[in-house]
Amino acid sequence: MKRNGRARRRVIASLCPEAEVIVDVGADHGHVARMVGGIATERQPHRAGRPDVPWVIADGLRPFSRVDVAIIAGMGARTIASILEAGPTPPIVVLHAPDDPVTLRRWLAASGWRIDAEALAPEAGRFAEVIRATRGHEPATGPTLDFGPRLLRSDDPWLQDHLAQLLGYHQRLAEATAGRASALHDVATLRASFLAAQLASRRGTTPL
Ligand SMILES: C[S@@+](CC[C@H](N)C(=O)[O-])C[C@H]1O[C@@H](n2cnc3c(N)ncnc32)[C@H](O)[C@@H]1O
């Protein structure tokens, strides 16, 4: 599995619609901004920033009066939420919270965002979950929301491997917490059975 971010950057760019004002918040080197023809931002001047994209020094989206699409990737779910809470609110966002996609999806659904598209990219031994959202109502709840309402219905080529990896993680967590930490154990057990059922339906088998 590839460890550099190229596959993830490609997926982010593929989920970004064409638009006049695309802002890549916390663009780091600026590779994604370059791919989508956007503006790259960082909170402080970035030594490694590529010179062939326009750079704006900005905390989140605050200095922009108009943003058609915001890309906010490679940051914590709470950081992404606080950038969007500070505004201005773009009509479309493309997001990736490596630490906690579940928290990010729950926040989106509770904050007037509808998950519109999702895709996976292999990165660092796991799968990055890239989420596109638009303003609106997200009808999914529970584990369907947590694990990706659009992703679970997609034919993403990495979905089976991703679900198997998540299933293994939650099964190990359920085993490790059996007989203690009962709230954690219950959540892990529920998630494991949901993921097992998802995998089985994709494989056309019945979960054990
Ligand atoms: C881990 S890097 C991710 C870089 C790139 N977006 C990616 O997905 O690979 C996070 C970057 O976001 C920047 N950052 C964090 N909070 C920010 C904010 N409020 N406004 C602008 N940039 C921010 C950091 O300086 C850092 O360069």
Image (tube, grey):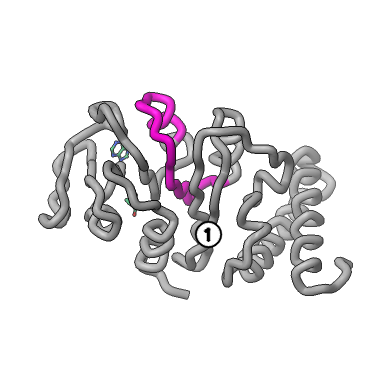
Image quadrant of ligand 1 equals top left
**For the point 73% across and 41% down, which residue is it?**
142
Residue 63 position (above or below residue 168) = above
Can residue 146 be seen from the camera position used here?
yes
Among the 4 quarters of the image, the one containing residue 10: bottom left
**For the point 48% across and 51% down, which residue is it?**
98
Front residue of 67 and 103? 67
How many numbered marks appear?
A: 1
Q: Amino acid at mark 1?
A: Ala
The quarter of the picture where the C terminus appears is: bottom right
Left or right: 161 as drawn, with respect to 194 = left
Left or right: 164 as drawn, with respect to 100 = right
**Residue 13 percent coordinates (x, y):** 37, 58
Magenta stretch?
81-101
Mark 1, Cα crowd under 10 Å, few <14 / some 14-19 / many 20+, is many
Residue 31 position (above or below residue 55) = below
Among the 4 quarters of the image, the one containing residue 206: bottom right
Residue 22 position (above or below residue 58) = below
Was residue 94 drawn as part of the magenta stretch in this picture?
yes
**For the point 16% across and 52% down, which residue is it?**
53
**For the point 51% across and 49% down, which residue is it?**
131
Mark 1 residue's CB less than 8 Å from ligand 1? no
**Residue 74 percent coordinates (x, y):** 39, 50
Can residue 107 be seen from the camera position used here?
no
Query: Mark 1 sits on what residue?
Result: 119
**Residue 58 percent coordinates (x, y):** 22, 33
Was residue 78 drawn as part of the magenta stretch in this picture?
no
Left or right: 27 as drawn, with respect to 129 = left
Disc 1 on helix, strand or loop? strand
Q: Residue furthest left?
A: 51
